[in-house]
Image (spheres, grey):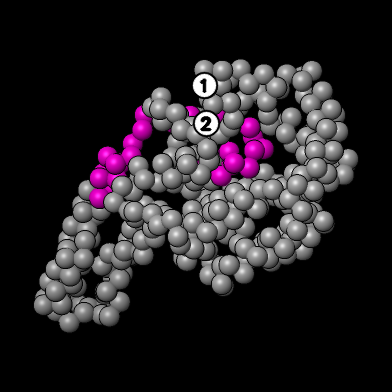
Protein backbone atom coordinates (compact mmCIF):
# COMPACT_ATOMS: atom_id res chain seq x y z
CA UNK A 1 0.00 0.00 0.00
CA UNK A 2 2.72 2.46 0.96
CA UNK A 3 4.86 1.48 -2.07
CA UNK A 4 1.94 2.14 -4.40
CA UNK A 5 1.19 5.49 -2.77
CA UNK A 6 4.85 6.54 -2.84
CA UNK A 7 5.12 5.63 -6.52
CA UNK A 8 2.03 7.68 -7.32
CA UNK A 9 3.37 10.67 -5.41
CA UNK A 10 6.71 10.55 -7.26
CA UNK A 11 4.92 10.26 -10.62
CA UNK A 12 2.79 13.31 -9.88
CA UNK A 13 5.62 15.44 -8.53
CA UNK A 14 7.88 14.64 -11.49
CA UNK A 15 5.17 15.74 -13.97
CA UNK A 16 4.61 19.26 -12.65
CA UNK A 17 4.80 21.44 -9.56
CA UNK A 18 1.34 21.07 -8.08
CA UNK A 19 -0.87 22.71 -5.48
CA UNK A 20 0.03 21.46 -1.93
CA UNK A 21 -3.47 20.07 -1.33
CA UNK A 22 -2.93 17.47 -4.04
CA UNK A 23 -1.28 15.39 -1.33
CA UNK A 24 -4.80 14.60 -0.21
CA UNK A 25 -5.27 12.47 -3.32
CA UNK A 26 -3.05 9.79 -1.89
CA UNK A 27 -4.60 7.05 0.19
CA UNK A 28 -4.19 7.41 3.95
CA UNK A 29 -4.13 4.33 6.15
CA UNK A 30 -5.44 4.80 9.69
CA UNK A 31 -3.57 3.37 12.66
CA UNK A 32 -4.60 -0.25 13.13
CA UNK A 33 -5.17 -1.28 16.74
CA UNK A 34 -4.69 -4.81 17.92
CA UNK A 35 -8.41 -5.31 18.50
CA UNK A 36 -10.01 -4.64 15.15
CA UNK A 37 -9.63 -5.26 11.42
CA UNK A 38 -7.86 -2.74 9.22
CA UNK A 39 -9.96 0.29 8.30
CA UNK A 40 -8.58 2.09 5.21
CA UNK A 41 -9.66 5.69 4.59
CA UNK A 42 -9.63 7.21 1.11
CA UNK A 43 -8.81 10.88 0.77
CA UNK A 44 -10.75 13.23 -1.52
CA UNK A 45 -9.64 14.28 -4.99
CA UNK A 46 -9.54 18.11 -4.98
CA UNK A 47 -9.12 19.88 -8.31
CA UNK A 48 -5.79 21.71 -8.39
CA UNK A 49 -5.81 25.32 -9.57
CA UNK A 50 -3.48 24.74 -12.55
CA UNK A 51 -4.32 25.98 -16.02
CA UNK A 52 -4.98 24.08 -19.22
CA UNK A 53 -3.64 20.64 -20.07
CA UNK A 54 -1.24 20.54 -17.11
CA UNK A 55 -4.25 20.21 -14.84
CA UNK A 56 -5.45 17.28 -16.91
CA UNK A 57 -2.10 15.50 -16.55
CA UNK A 58 -2.11 15.99 -12.77
CA UNK A 59 -5.70 14.82 -12.42
CA UNK A 60 -5.03 11.72 -14.51
CA UNK A 61 -1.94 10.82 -12.48
CA UNK A 62 -3.83 11.23 -9.18
CA UNK A 63 -6.77 9.19 -10.46
CA UNK A 64 -4.40 6.42 -11.55
CA UNK A 65 -2.82 6.36 -8.09
CA UNK A 66 -6.23 6.19 -6.45
CA UNK A 67 -7.28 3.36 -8.76
CA UNK A 68 -4.17 1.35 -7.95
CA UNK A 69 -4.68 1.86 -4.22
CA UNK A 70 -8.34 0.84 -4.43
CA UNK A 71 -7.28 -2.37 -6.17
CA UNK A 72 -4.79 -3.15 -3.40
CA UNK A 73 -7.44 -2.34 -0.77
CA UNK A 74 -9.91 -4.70 -2.46
CA UNK A 75 -7.35 -7.51 -2.28
CA UNK A 76 -6.70 -6.78 1.40
CA UNK A 77 -10.43 -6.80 2.19
CA UNK A 78 -10.82 -10.05 0.29
CA UNK A 79 -7.99 -11.55 2.33
CA UNK A 80 -9.72 -10.63 5.58
CA UNK A 81 -12.94 -12.23 4.36
CA UNK A 82 -11.08 -15.43 3.61
CA UNK A 83 -9.67 -15.49 7.14
CA UNK A 84 -13.09 -15.32 8.79
CA UNK A 85 -16.17 -15.70 6.65
CA UNK A 86 -18.56 -18.11 8.41
CA UNK A 87 -21.77 -19.21 6.76
CA UNK A 88 -23.82 -19.08 9.95
CA UNK A 89 -23.28 -17.55 13.39
CA UNK A 90 -25.97 -18.18 16.03
CA UNK A 91 -26.09 -16.69 19.53
CA UNK A 92 -28.17 -18.43 22.21
CA UNK A 93 -28.91 -15.81 24.84
CA UNK A 94 -31.07 -14.01 27.36
CA UNK A 95 -31.72 -10.47 26.16
CA UNK A 96 -30.79 -8.84 29.47
CA UNK A 97 -27.78 -11.07 30.25
CA UNK A 98 -24.61 -8.91 30.60
CA UNK A 99 -22.36 -11.74 29.38
CA UNK A 100 -24.51 -12.24 26.29
CA UNK A 101 -24.36 -8.50 25.66
CA UNK A 102 -20.55 -8.61 25.80
CA UNK A 103 -20.58 -11.05 22.88
CA UNK A 104 -23.15 -8.98 20.98
CA UNK A 105 -21.06 -5.83 21.40
CA UNK A 106 -18.10 -7.61 19.76
CA UNK A 107 -20.25 -8.98 16.93
CA UNK A 108 -21.94 -5.63 16.31
CA UNK A 109 -18.69 -3.65 16.38
CA UNK A 110 -17.07 -6.02 13.87
CA UNK A 111 -20.24 -6.17 11.72
CA UNK A 112 -20.44 -9.95 11.90
CA UNK A 113 -23.96 -11.05 10.87
CA UNK A 114 -25.54 -13.35 13.45
CA UNK A 115 -28.84 -14.91 14.33
CA UNK A 116 -30.30 -14.86 17.83
CA UNK A 117 -32.11 -17.65 19.61
CA UNK A 118 -33.77 -16.28 22.73
CA UNK A 119 -33.58 -18.95 25.43
CA UNK A 120 -36.51 -19.44 27.79
CA UNK A 121 -34.87 -19.18 31.25
CA UNK A 122 -37.46 -21.49 32.78
CA UNK A 123 -37.45 -24.45 30.40
CA UNK A 124 -34.17 -23.81 28.52
CA UNK A 125 -35.62 -26.00 25.79
CA UNK A 126 -33.70 -24.05 23.14
CA UNK A 127 -30.37 -25.38 24.44
CA UNK A 128 -31.38 -28.92 25.36
CA UNK A 129 -29.18 -30.10 22.51
CA UNK A 130 -26.09 -28.82 24.40
CA UNK A 131 -24.34 -30.28 27.44
CA UNK A 132 -23.62 -26.67 28.47
CA UNK A 133 -26.67 -25.24 30.23
CA UNK A 134 -25.68 -21.58 30.54
CA UNK A 135 -25.74 -18.66 28.14
CA UNK A 136 -24.19 -17.32 26.05
CA UNK A 137 -23.59 -20.16 23.63
CA UNK A 138 -22.31 -19.23 20.18
CA UNK A 139 -22.26 -21.61 17.25
CA UNK A 140 -20.11 -20.93 14.20
CA UNK A 141 -21.14 -23.18 11.33
CA UNK A 142 -22.30 -25.70 13.93
CA UNK A 143 -19.21 -25.48 16.18
CA UNK A 144 -20.14 -24.65 19.78
CA UNK A 145 -18.30 -21.97 21.76
CA UNK A 146 -19.13 -21.17 25.40
CA UNK A 147 -18.20 -18.58 28.07
CA UNK A 148 -18.34 -14.95 26.93
CA UNK A 149 -14.64 -14.12 27.27
CA UNK A 150 -13.57 -17.39 25.64
CA UNK A 151 -16.04 -16.78 22.80
CA UNK A 152 -14.62 -13.31 22.17
CA UNK A 153 -11.02 -14.58 22.30
CA UNK A 154 -11.87 -17.30 19.78
CA UNK A 155 -13.60 -14.85 17.44
CA UNK A 156 -10.69 -12.41 17.67
CA UNK A 157 -8.11 -15.08 16.85
CA UNK A 158 -10.15 -16.29 13.88
CA UNK A 159 -10.30 -12.74 12.56
CA UNK A 160 -6.67 -11.90 13.37
CA UNK A 161 -4.61 -15.14 13.38
CA UNK A 162 -1.45 -13.05 12.89
CA UNK A 163 -1.88 -11.26 16.24
CA UNK A 164 -0.70 -12.91 19.45
CA UNK A 165 -2.59 -11.50 22.44
CA UNK A 166 -0.74 -10.89 25.69
CA UNK A 167 -2.18 -12.14 28.97
CA UNK A 168 -0.49 -9.40 30.96
CA UNK A 169 -1.40 -6.07 29.40
CA UNK A 170 -3.77 -3.18 30.06
CA UNK A 171 -6.53 -4.59 27.91
CA UNK A 172 -6.50 -7.99 29.65
CA UNK A 173 -6.39 -6.37 33.09
CA UNK A 174 -9.60 -4.43 32.45
CA UNK A 175 -11.37 -7.33 30.79
CA UNK A 176 -10.77 -9.30 33.98
CA UNK A 177 -12.03 -6.33 36.00
CA UNK A 178 -15.30 -6.47 34.06
CA UNK A 179 -15.78 -10.20 34.74
CA UNK A 180 -14.60 -10.18 38.35
CA UNK A 181 -16.00 -6.89 39.59
CA UNK A 182 -18.24 -4.82 37.34
CA UNK A 183 -20.80 -7.53 36.53
CA UNK A 184 -21.31 -8.26 40.24
CA UNK A 185 -22.57 -4.72 40.80
CA UNK A 186 -25.45 -5.01 38.35
CA UNK A 187 -27.94 -7.24 40.18
CA UNK A 188 -27.74 -5.38 43.51
CA UNK A 189 -28.49 -2.19 41.57
CA UNK A 190 -31.26 -3.23 39.21
CA UNK A 191 -33.06 -5.16 42.00
CA UNK A 192 -32.20 -2.86 44.90
CA UNK A 193 -35.87 -2.13 45.74
CA UNK A 194 -39.26 -3.45 44.63
CA UNK A 195 -39.95 -0.72 42.07
CA UNK A 196 -36.57 -1.18 40.35
CA UNK A 197 -36.93 -4.96 40.49
CA UNK A 198 -40.31 -4.68 38.74
CA UNK A 199 -38.85 -2.26 36.19
CA UNK A 200 -36.03 -4.70 35.44
CA UNK A 201 -38.32 -7.70 35.10
CA UNK A 202 -40.69 -5.75 32.90
CA UNK A 203 -37.75 -5.21 30.53
CA UNK A 204 -36.60 -8.83 30.84
CA UNK A 205 -40.02 -10.36 30.20
CA UNK A 206 -40.85 -7.95 27.38
CA UNK A 207 -37.65 -8.73 25.49
CA UNK A 208 -37.29 -12.37 26.54
CA UNK A 209 -38.77 -15.63 25.28
CA UNK A 210 -41.83 -16.01 27.54
CA UNK A 211 -45.40 -17.08 26.99
CA UNK A 212 -48.10 -14.68 28.26
CA UNK A 213 -48.57 -16.71 31.45
CA UNK A 214 -44.83 -17.07 32.01
CA UNK A 215 -44.43 -13.32 31.52
CA UNK A 216 -46.88 -12.52 34.30
CA UNK A 217 -45.40 -15.10 36.68
CA UNK A 218 -41.82 -14.13 35.90
CA UNK A 219 -42.41 -10.40 36.29
CA UNK A 220 -43.90 -10.51 39.77
CA UNK A 221 -42.47 -13.72 41.21
CA UNK A 222 -39.08 -13.12 39.60
CA UNK A 223 -38.89 -9.52 40.77
CA UNK A 224 -39.70 -10.57 44.33
CA UNK A 225 -37.18 -13.41 44.30
CA UNK A 226 -34.39 -11.30 42.79
CA UNK A 227 -34.96 -8.52 45.30
CA UNK A 228 -33.95 -10.96 48.06
CA UNK A 229 -31.20 -12.54 45.95
CA UNK A 230 -29.67 -9.10 45.40
CA UNK A 231 -29.36 -8.65 49.16
CA UNK A 232 -27.40 -11.89 49.40
CA UNK A 233 -25.17 -10.78 46.54
CA UNK A 234 -24.39 -7.56 48.38
CA UNK A 235 -23.11 -9.59 51.32
CA UNK A 236 -21.22 -12.04 49.12
CA UNK A 237 -19.30 -9.27 47.34
CA UNK A 238 -18.99 -6.96 50.35
CA UNK A 239 -21.13 -4.22 48.83
CA UNK A 240 -22.40 -1.73 51.40
CA UNK A 241 -24.02 0.87 49.14
CA UNK A 242 -24.82 -0.58 45.72
CA UNK A 243 -25.29 2.78 43.96
CA UNK A 244 -22.11 4.21 45.39
CA UNK A 245 -20.26 1.08 44.28
CA UNK A 246 -21.66 1.42 40.74
CA UNK A 247 -20.67 5.09 40.59
CA UNK A 248 -17.20 4.27 41.87
CA UNK A 249 -16.78 1.60 39.19
CA UNK A 250 -17.85 4.04 36.48
CA UNK A 251 -15.36 6.64 37.74
CA UNK A 252 -12.63 4.02 37.98
CA UNK A 253 -13.19 3.14 34.34
CA UNK A 254 -13.10 6.78 33.22
CA UNK A 255 -9.83 7.26 35.14
CA UNK A 256 -8.41 4.22 33.33
CA UNK A 257 -9.04 5.93 29.99
CA UNK A 258 -6.47 8.62 30.93
CA UNK A 259 -8.29 11.19 28.79
CA UNK A 260 -8.12 8.93 25.73
CA UNK A 261 -11.32 8.49 23.70
CA UNK A 262 -11.17 4.75 24.42
CA UNK A 263 -8.95 2.44 26.43
CA UNK A 264 -7.71 1.25 23.04
CA UNK A 265 -6.71 4.81 22.12
CA UNK A 266 -8.38 6.14 18.98
CA UNK A 267 -10.42 2.95 18.57
CA UNK A 268 -12.16 0.68 21.11
CA UNK A 269 -10.34 -2.46 22.18
CA UNK A 270 -11.75 -5.64 23.73
CA UNK A 271 -11.91 -4.05 27.18
CA UNK A 272 -13.95 -1.10 25.85
CA UNK A 273 -16.35 -3.55 24.22
CA UNK A 274 -16.62 -5.62 27.41
CA UNK A 275 -17.51 -2.64 29.61
CA UNK A 276 -19.95 -1.32 27.03
CA UNK A 277 -21.59 -4.71 26.56
CA UNK A 278 -22.07 -5.29 30.28
CA UNK A 279 -23.55 -1.82 30.85
CA UNK A 280 -25.78 -1.80 27.78
CA UNK A 281 -28.69 -3.78 29.34
CA UNK A 282 -28.97 -1.35 32.27
CA UNK A 283 -28.23 1.93 30.47
CA UNK A 284 -31.88 3.00 30.19
CA UNK A 285 -33.09 1.48 33.45
CA UNK A 286 -33.16 3.73 36.51
CA UNK A 287 -29.79 2.44 37.72
CA UNK A 288 -28.14 3.16 34.37
CA UNK A 289 -29.66 6.63 34.13
CA UNK A 290 -28.45 7.40 37.66
CA UNK A 291 -24.97 6.17 36.75
CA UNK A 292 -24.76 8.46 33.71
CA UNK A 293 -26.23 11.43 35.61
CA UNK A 294 -23.87 11.09 38.58
CA UNK A 295 -20.56 10.10 36.98
CA UNK A 296 -18.36 11.07 34.04
CA UNK A 297 -19.02 7.88 32.06
CA UNK A 298 -21.76 9.31 29.82
CA UNK A 299 -19.46 10.84 27.22
CA UNK A 300 -17.51 7.60 26.73
CA UNK A 301 -20.72 5.56 26.62
CA UNK A 302 -22.21 7.81 23.92
CA UNK A 303 -19.02 7.47 21.86
CA UNK A 304 -19.25 3.70 22.17
CA UNK A 305 -22.91 3.69 21.11
CA UNK A 306 -22.02 5.63 17.98
CA UNK A 307 -18.91 3.58 17.22
CA UNK A 308 -20.49 0.15 17.74
CA UNK A 309 -23.45 1.29 15.67
CA UNK A 310 -26.53 -0.65 14.74
CA UNK A 311 -26.78 -4.36 15.60
CA UNK A 312 -25.50 -6.71 12.89
CA UNK A 313 -28.15 -9.23 13.95
CA UNK A 314 -30.05 -10.97 11.15
CA UNK A 315 -33.74 -10.48 11.78
CA UNK A 316 -35.93 -13.38 10.76
Determine whether 153 is above or below 48 in the image. above
- Residue that badge 2 annotates: 137
Residue occupying the point 22% across, 48% down: 75
Q: Residue at x 30, y 77 (%)?
A: 21
In-image side of 75 versus 276 (left or right): left
Placement of 219 over or under 309, stated as above or below: above
**For the residue carrying disc 2, how many other residues have a C-alpha within 10 Å: few (<14), some (14-19), or many (20+)?**
many
**Magenta stretch, residue numbers:** 76-103
The residue depicted at 77 percent of the width and 63 percent of the height is: 294
Could you tell whether 7 is left or right of 155 in the image? left
Residue annotated with mark 1:
130
Left or right of 200: which side holds 207?
A: left
- Contact between marks 1 and 2 (CB within 8 A): the answer is yes
Residue 314 screen position, x and y as percent: 50, 31
Q: Residue 313: give x, y in percent of width and height.
A: 51, 35
**Residue 304 location (% of width, % of height):** 56, 56
The image quarter containing residue 96 is top right
Q: Is residue 23 left or right of residue 231?
A: left
Q: How many marks?
A: 2
Q: Is residue 121 magenta?
A: no
Amino acid sequence: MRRVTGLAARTISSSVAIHPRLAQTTVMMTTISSSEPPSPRFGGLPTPSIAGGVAGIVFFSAAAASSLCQEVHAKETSGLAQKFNPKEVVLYQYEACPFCNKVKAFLDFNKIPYKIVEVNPMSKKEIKWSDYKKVPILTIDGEQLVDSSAIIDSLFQRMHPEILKSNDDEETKWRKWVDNHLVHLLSPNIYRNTSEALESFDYITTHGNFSFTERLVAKYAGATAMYFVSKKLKKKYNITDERAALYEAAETWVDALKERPYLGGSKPNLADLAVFGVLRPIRYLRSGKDMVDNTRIGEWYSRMENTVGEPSRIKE
